[in-house]
Image (cartoon, helix red, strand yellow):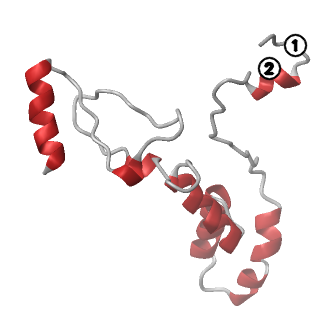
Amino acid sequence: MLMNAAFVEALRLFPFHCITLHDVDLLALSDDTPYGCPTFPQHTSVHIDKFRNRSQILTLGEARYRLDGLNSLNYTLVDQYVKFYHSSDENATNMKGRSNQSTVQHWLVHLKIDVGRAPSWLRIASVQVKR
């Protein structure tokens, strides 16, 4: 109710075209939270984790990888293999060897944005960055 009153009072001061409302536990403590004024309203809490400032989707994906040992690409390959050979026990025992022989390239993606520092690719390239 307090946010509704604040919205009405803010519109009396200036006709804002975009307003972002936060609850206390959803305060953005880092700059990687996507803010903008899209055509349709959006909920940004899926991008905010109040404990580690990381995308909750990325955190869940990493937890699944720790539990399953599979990323999405491997899961798709294994799932297709199991569906194709679901009736044969001989092929099911050979599944582990075949999934290791796949030609999928694994990519590790870090989505953390470190504000105030040069990008990691720039630091690695032996370029001097003056602060």
Would you say 37 lies left or right of 28 here? left
Would you say 95 lies left or right of 43 here? right
The residue that mark 2 highlights is 122
SS at mark 2? helix
Q: Amino acid at mark 2?
A: Leu
SS at mark 1? loop
Provide residue 29's location: percent of width, then percent of height. 51, 41
Picture quadrant of residue 36: top left
The residue that mark 1 highlights is 127
Q: Is residue 107 above or below residue 51?
A: above
Residue name at image x 47 percent, y 37 percent: 33
Q: Are marks 2 and 1 in contact (CB under 8 Å)?
A: yes
Provide residue 13's location: percent of width, then percent of height. 13, 20
Picture quadrant of residue 126: top right
- Crowd tier of the residue under label 1, counting other residues whose Cα lies within 10 Å: few below 14, some 14–19, many 20 or above: few
Front residue of this view, candidates 119 and 105? 119
Can you say which quadrant of the picture contains the C terminus?
top right
